[in-house]
Image (spheres, grey):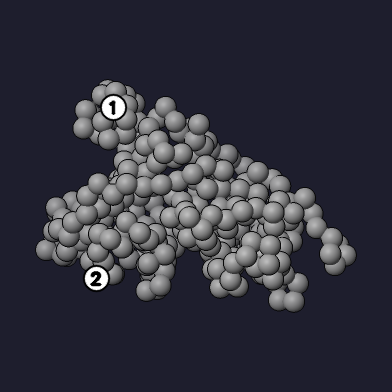
């Protein structure tokens, strides 16, 4: 490709608009745009992304914002940086290094608008079964917060998460409401490396159904996730109720392995 040439996908990225009025950080918006182009097939494995300087100039953002976005994509195994050549779309079968998850970037990559409402935030002593599940000693304190995750303003997921207090000792309700908790953890060296998840079909009771804006007795997926650091510590336990009328779970099996995705109507 000659200098100055630009593929359709590159042009689409460079002509995108970031919102300064959004609660979503600029780097997260950029991550969502690039992930959307990869997921849609507009950016294919091995294709070159626009350079840092091109992204800074076209989107009117700082180099630090671009580097933070590319760093997150690289950590997810979606892109790979080659010295002196640029950043390329990676082959996920050979480069994925961990299992970071962000509701915001997942939904943004679908071209939809994510948001969250914090229902509850507390520091508490968890019950015996949660301590066992997270490998905590009895009496250890954890943060527990419940959020309603929304897509285009409509409730989709009722999510309750537990985190050991020691991993981020001074967390406040205001911080959870105004920041991505995963980004806060990243800055203190806590990064997801592996996770175990399960899905069950359940019926929503009246309280949960009301929070999700559906009728009592509606079907849902009950999702549990335990996330570990590279040294094997469980630092997150999340249980969620996901509206089954909006979400489809897809499994793709091939010789090299199996992939699992969820799509939202």
Name the residue beneath numbered marker 2: 170
Residue count near mark 1 (Cα–Cα under 10 Å), binned few <14, some 14–19, many ≥20: some
Q: Residue at x 49, y 44 (%)?
A: 113
Q: Earlier in the sequence, mark 1 or mark 2?
A: 2
* Residue 97 appearing in the image: no
Q: Quadrant of residue 247?
A: top left
Q: Is residue 64 above or below residue 21?
A: below
State which quarter of the image contains the N terminus: bottom right
- Residue sitting at the far front: 21
In which quarter of the view is residue 224 placed? top left
Residue in the foreground of this view, choosing between 205 and 26:
26
Residue plotted at (39% across, 51% down): 196
252 left or right of 8 in image = left
Tell me if I can see residue 24 in this picture.
Answer: yes
Q: Position of residue 87 (x, y in %)?
A: 69, 66
Cα–Cα gap, marks 1 and 2? 37 Å
* Residue nearest the viewer, comparing 227 with 72: 72
Q: Nearer the viewer, mark 1 or mark 2?
A: 2
Residue occupying image coordinates x 80% and y 58%: 6
* Residue pointed to by mark 1: 203
Q: From the viewer's perspective, tell me whether residue 93 is left or right of residue 212.
A: right
Identify the mark at residue 74; answer none if there is no mark. Answer: none
Look at the picture and state if 161 lies above or below 249: below
Instruction: Find numbered disc 2 in the image and state the secondary structure of the residue it sits on.
Output: loop
Which residue occupies the foreground of this view, 101 or 122?
A: 122
Label 1: element kind: strand
Judge the density around disc 2: few (<14), some (14-19), many (≥20) Cα neighbours within 10 Å: few
As drawn, is 202 to the left or to the right of 59? left
Residue 140, x across and y down, in percent: 16, 65
């Amino acid at each position: 490709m000659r200098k100055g040439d630009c593929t359709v996908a590159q042009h689409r990225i460079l002509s995108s608009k970031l919102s300064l009025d959004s609660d979503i950080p600029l780097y997260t918006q950029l991550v969502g745009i690039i992930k959307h182009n990869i997921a849609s097939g507009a950016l294919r494995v091995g294709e070159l992304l626009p350079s840092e300087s091109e992204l800074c100039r076209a989107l009117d953002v700082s180099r630090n914002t671009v580097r933070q976005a590319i760093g997150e994509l690289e950590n997810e195994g979606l892109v790979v940086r080659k010295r002196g050549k640029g950043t390329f779309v990676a082959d996920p079968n050979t480069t994925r290094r961990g299992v970071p998850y962000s509701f915001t970037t997942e939904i943004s990559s679908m071209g939809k608008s994510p948001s969250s409402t914090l229902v509850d935030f507390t520091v508490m002593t968890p019950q015996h079964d949660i301590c066992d599940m997270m490998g905590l000693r009895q009496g250890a304190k954890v943060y527990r917060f419940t959020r309603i995750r929304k897509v285009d303003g409509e409730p989709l997921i009722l999510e309750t998460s537990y985190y050991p207090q020691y991993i981020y000792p001074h967390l406040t309700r205001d911080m959870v409401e105004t920041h991505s908790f995963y980004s806060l953890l990243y800055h203190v060296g806590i990064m997801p490396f592996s996770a175990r998840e399960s899905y069950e079909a359940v019926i929503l009771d009246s309280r949960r159904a009301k929070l999700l804006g559906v009728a009592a007795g509606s079907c849902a997926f009950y999702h549990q996730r335990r996330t570990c650091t590279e040294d094997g510590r469980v630092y997150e336990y999340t249980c969620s109720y996901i509206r089954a009328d909006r979400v489809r779970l897809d499994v793709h099996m091939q010789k090299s392995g199996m992939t699992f995705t969820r799509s939202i109507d």
